[in-house]
Amino acid sequence: MKKTYRIKKNEEFQQVFQHGQSFANRQLVLYYLKKQHQPHFRIGLSVSKKIGSAVVRNQIKRYLRQAFHELEPELFSQFDFVIIARKPTYKMSYHEMKSSLTHVLTRSKVMKKKRRR
């Protein structure tokens, strides 16, 4: 994922936490904030040291970035997202992680509705 798609600065994380909305399930917490004049979405990932070793935490972040990459055409572009991984994510496969992320994004109404054929 390109650097322009990432949230790195603490001030940007805090802005999303303080002014955005949130939705959660058992595995993930999603904070999102609408930004009007933004050409594409940005994501910030947070995985606590309580979840596991650095290897496990980096794997979770890779899974989430890849899931966002695959879901990119279905997401509205004017949002900043911050994803916080909860404890159950350490034993999830990529497909389970993507399913959980899709659930959170759909319930928070930041994904475009799929057209039925």
Image: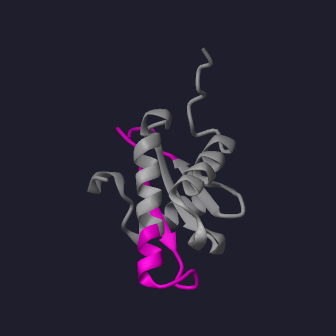
Residue 35 appears in the rendering: no
- The quadrant holding residue 11 is bottom left
Q: Is residue 32 magenta?
A: no
Q: Is residue 109 above or below residue 17?
A: above
Q: Is residue 36 above or below residue 115?
A: below
* x then y, percent, for residue 33: 54, 50
Residue displayed at 58% across by 40% down: 110
* x then y, percent, for residue 36: 45, 38
Name the quarter where the C terminus is drawn.
top right
Residue 42 appears in the rendering: yes
Q: Is residue 39 magenta?
A: yes
Q: Is residue 99 above or below residue 28?
A: above
The one of 24 and 88 positioned closer to us in this rendering: 88
Q: Is residue 85 left or right of residue 64?
A: right
Please give the range of residues in magenta.
34-59
* x then y, percent, for residue 113: 60, 28
Q: Which residue extends farthest right?
A: 26
Q: Is residue 35 left or right of residue 50?
A: left
